[in-house]
Each structure stands twice: as structure tokens, then as C-alpha cells.
Amino acid sequence: MKILVIEDDLEAAAYMTKAFREAGIVADHASDGESGLFMGSENTYDVMVVDRMLPRRDGLSVISELRKRGIDTPVLILSALGQVDDRVTGLRAGGDDYLPKPYAFSELLARVEVLGRRKGKPEQDMVYRVGDLELDRLSHEVKRAGREILLQPREFRLLEYLMKNAGQVVTRTMLLEHVWDYHFDPQTNVIDVHVSRLRSKIEKDFDRPLLKTVRGAGYMIKDEG
């Protein structure tokens, strides 16, 4: 994977690019909006990580211009502005994901990996499969080994997001954003309750577990059979 980091804080950028490279990701760096726009337009990247507050041209302007030029590279926005309205503004400007500062690099890495896979896996995939588990996004049917599994709407959205990112850790924050849309207190145990119910439905009476809890990180759905 090759990514572009547009970040004016040189110390933060150096740490970030070094950590990405240690994770096996090629990371280029631009230190201002104009340079970032030029590099993002002239080169091919799998993902761009864009700071919102940049000199010469702000991050949202960079993203908007890239989209006007027909460049659809997935963009993750970094910003100290973390309110819901700020996130909505960023996403409407053309961003694909939004991570407020301060953040843990492990979560940033997970999100970049998800966006990188999204570029190579078109959204028009209507059926997700993990082992013998199958989810049809059009009919909203879920089956395992040919047996129908009935899910509540929120459970379906949770499973859909996990299967879309099969084999990768999905953090609690990612679930908050994509399944619950921040509409509850993040300190509650609602995610754990729903994951527990979902696990019971898709694993009861079946031989192999699929839904795993990754301690201190989040959840992953994967077939290890």
C-alpha cells in the first residue's frame, strides 16, 4: 500500500510516516496544502491522510479540489476539531473517514488499512462471505451453512460492517461512527451487548467461531477453518 500524509506538524509527520513504513506501508509526506494537492494530483496513492488545518491551503479545500479533478482516492481526515458537526463538514467535503486528535496510531493504522481495501473492493459487492456465513445486502438475508439467521436491524448493520472489513480489527470507535452514528454515550456497554447477541446468533450450534474479541483493540470476524 502507498499513502500520502499531508501534515504540517513535522514532528508528528515524521513519527507517522516512520510508523507506517514499519507496518509495511510506503508513506510520502507533504507539509502544506498546496504541496499535498500537487502530490495527490500527480501521483497514485491508495489512501491519503490529510490534516484539516494546513498552511497555504486548508485540508478540506485540498480534498474538495481533488474530488473536482476526479481523484477518488480514499481520504482520512485528521483534526483537533472533533465535534459531530466538524466531522459532518469533513465528510461532506469529500473525506471518507475522520479521526480526531489526539489519536492512537494503532487506530489510525487500522482505519488506513480499511480505506485501502475499500479502494480495491467496490461497494457494489452485494454479498459478503466469511467461511460458511453469508450476508446479502439487498435482501437483508443472513445464512450460515445454508441455515437462515434472523437479525435485528442494528445487528444486521453490525455484522455487515464487520464482514465488509473481514480479517481486520474493527475498533469500538469505528463501530460508533459507522453503525451507531454517535447517537449514544460512548461510555455505555451497548457495543458489547450487541456483539454478544450477534455472536450467539451466528455461532450457536455451529462448529467454528467466527467473531473474535481482540483484547484492547476491538473485534474481528474471520474464518480460521
Image: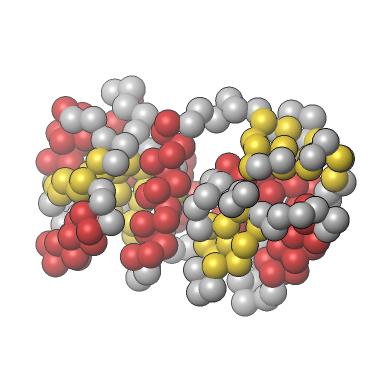
State the quadrant of the N terminus: top left
Q: How many marks?
A: 0
Farthest-out residue, top: 70
Question: Is 88 situated above or below 10?
Answer: above
Colour scheme used in the picture? secondary structure
Q: Decide if residue 25 is on the left or right side of residue 130.
A: left
Q: Is residue 149 among the parts visible in the rendering?
A: yes
**Horizontal and vertical percent position of residue 89:** 45, 48
Residue 215 in the image: state x and y as whole percent: 54, 73
Between 61 and 112, the one lying in front of the other is 112
Above or below, comparing residue 77 to residue 102 in the picture: above
Task: Find residue 210 and report its image quarter.
Answer: bottom right
What percent of the width, then of the height, locates residue 193?
Answer: 75, 69
Q: Would you say 134 lies left or right of 83 here?
A: right
> What residue do we see at 72% from left, 42% from top?
133
Residue at (34, 33) in percent of width and height:
73
Q: Residue at x 79, y 48 (%)?
A: 153
Is residue 80 in sight in this rendering? no
Residue 188 location, x and y as percent?
68, 75
Q: As drawn, is 133 to the left or to the right of 75?
A: right
Residue at (74%, 28%) from the top-left corner?
138
Horizontal side of 181 relative to 149 (left or right) equals left
